[in-house]
Image (cartoon, helix red, strand yellow):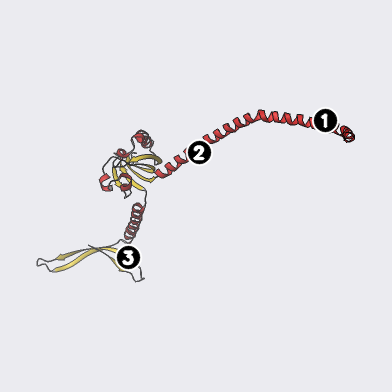
Amino acid sequence: DISHRILLPDGAVKHVHTHCTLSSDGAGTPLRSQGSIQDITKAKAFEHDLTTALNKYRDFVEGTDNLVTQVDATGKFTYLNHTARTIYAMEPKDLVGKLAFEFIHPDDQETTKSAFMGWVRDKVRHATFNNRQVSATGKVRRLLWSINFEYDAQGGLVSVNSIARDVTREMEAQNKLKNFALRLARSNKEIKSFAYIVSHDLRAPLVNLKGFTAELSFAVKDLMTVFPQALPQLDDES
């Protein structure tokens, strides 16, 4: 059995698989050979395309900073890419066979299990979810998961393929921004309260000042009326 290429008269190249059987006499002298040639060009093209696709997928999986995992129907890891070292502080090969739920933060265990059971019950194909993961060293990270479920013909869960992005810093930044907004709101409220108190305290003096100004205006008017009449008398006396 041998696989090789042949060159056709029109210049086309074909991949073929040759099978040959040799018949010999009692002394071992070859008498005849029988064989068959099978055109495997399409199979070779498919094999090439599959290999190319697998290489591209491997480059993506091993080149991304996102966590890529596969979990079987029992909830155990069957595959993790290199990012597992960062997230879980363990080698990917050492994580294979361990329950994925063991690394979920205790406060997120119940909500994660409840969501997971609901997805499987409803035969959901894709879901997104975020929870906290705890590494072997105790470091906590929040991950945003994109989850794909695979089922068999009877609807049983076969595997769960997931990609997770570490959003710890983003969530921390959002929390800081939220806290800043709350402090700003409190400051604005305090400023408004202070402005109200100041305006209230200044209102009475301003009203009095306004009344005094009005009285002073009337007095000046009266004085301006009397002053021209008294001016000649002042001149005579001088």
Query: Where residue 222 is drawn, which disc sits there?
Result: 1
**Farthest residue, direction bottom:** 9
Return the residue found at the far front.
238
Res 149 quadrant in image: top left
Of 194 and 139, nearer the camera is: 194
Q: Reading the chain from its start, which is encountered first: label 2 or label 3?
A: 3
Is any part of residue 216 visible from this angle?
A: yes
- Mark pair 2, 1: CA separation: 59 Å
Secondary structure of the residue carrying numbered label 1 = helix
Between 60 and 205, the one lying in front of the other is 205
Q: Which residue is mark 3?
A: 14
Measured in 3D between alpha carbons, the distance from the residue under mark 2 to the one under mark 3, in whole angstroms, is 70 Å
Tell me where residue 54 sits by quadrant.
Answer: bottom left
Inspect this view and state whether residue 167 appears.
no
Closer mark to the observer between disc 2 and disc 3: 2
Q: Label 1 amino acid?
A: Asp
Residue indicated by mark 2: 181
Q: Amino acid at mark 2?
A: Ala
